[in-house]
Amino acid sequence: MTANIPRRSVLRRAIGIAAGAAVGSQVLATPGHAAAAPAPGPDLGALRKLTQDAREREARVRTGAASGNGWEMEKVVNDRGNIYTRPVPGTPLGINVRMGNVETVLVHVISRFHYEVAALHEGDVVSWRPPASVRRHLAESNQASGTAVQIRPASYPTGARGGFYPLEELTLRDILADCEGVVRWGGDDKVPDESLFYIDVPPGDRRLTSISGKLRGWAFTPGQGAGTMIDPLQPERLRAAKRLAGQQA
């Protein structure tokens, strides 16, 4: 017995089948389905150019030699290396410094010096120096890797001690305590350079990441960080500064 299917339903079904067949025939007729096109091969000319550019950059920027603290010295700044000119907020200064965590820490040191020890002016801070201009047996070599700064070097010449008043030195010790041993003061070195402050941990040290995170948090928290009223004679702060001084002596 034949089912009584309405004529309108039959027409709808027929139209649907026809449309599907038409679409299927078009899909099958496209080149992608008729035969898989081979994947384009690598552009060897472009790859060679990229390789050559990378080699030229390496030769232009890198030295392959480490400064005293283990960071690689670089030949240039602002030229696709790791060292760029960065501002020090609250001051007229721009410093050539290794970008990232090193920048965060050294900017904090300079900022606190500016607010609490002596106001700094353009030219008061010497940051990156070309590798050929530093003495590699001294801590100043760290400037060539973008991990050290000299603050008012003309006022605190290499080899001399006692350039700071007692309260100024207490403040410096408090700044170092903020950095929890990640920064060393050149005034504590065997050959003193009281203008010098440098990163005292090697690349990849987790302490640098931790301290820079802390300092960035302070920068966005009212009442904390550089520019706030800090009393280095508070017992807790004084103890922390003395303890670190003993460790770094």
Image (cartoon, rainbow, N blue to C red):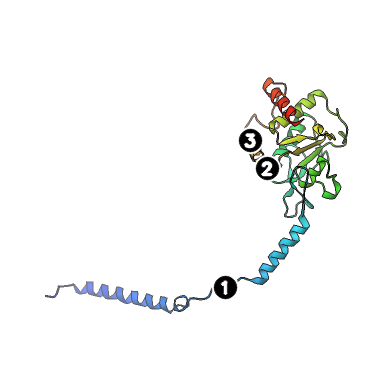
In this view of the protein, which residue sits in the foreground, 206 or 127? 206
Mark 3 residue type: Lys
Q: Is residue 222 above or below residue 94?
A: above
Sequence-first tag of 3 and 2: 2
In this view of the protein, which residue sits in the foreground, 178 or 140? 140
In this view of the protein, which residue sits in the foreground, 219 or 142? 142
Q: Residue at point 75% right, 31% down? A: 248
Q: Position of residue 55 (x, y in %)?
A: 73, 61
The residue at the far left in this view is 1
Q: Is residue 244 above or below residue 203?
A: above
Q: Position of residue 245 (x, y in %)?
A: 74, 28
Q: Quadrant of the C terminus?
A: top right
Answer few, some or many: residues within 10 Å of disc 3's Cα (few below 14, many 20 plus, some between 14 and 19): some
* Quarter of the rendering containing residue 196: top right
Sequence-first tag of 1 and 3: 1
- The reply to whether discs 1 and 3 touch (Cβ–Cβ < 8 Å) is no
**SS under mark 3:** helix
Mark 1 residue type: Pro
* Quarter of the rendering containing residue 162: top right
Mark 2 residue type: Asn
Residue 214, label in figure: 3
- The reply to whether discs 2 and 1 touch (Cβ–Cβ < 8 Å) is no
Q: Position of residue 152 (x, y in %)?
A: 84, 36
Q: Is residue 18 left or right of residue 45?
A: left
Q: Is residue 108 left or right of residue 42?
A: right
Residue corresponding to mark 1: 40
Residue corresponding to mark 2: 101
Q: Quadrant of the N terminus?
A: bottom left
Q: Residue at point 59% right, 72% down? A: 41
* Quarter of the rendering containing residue 30: bottom left
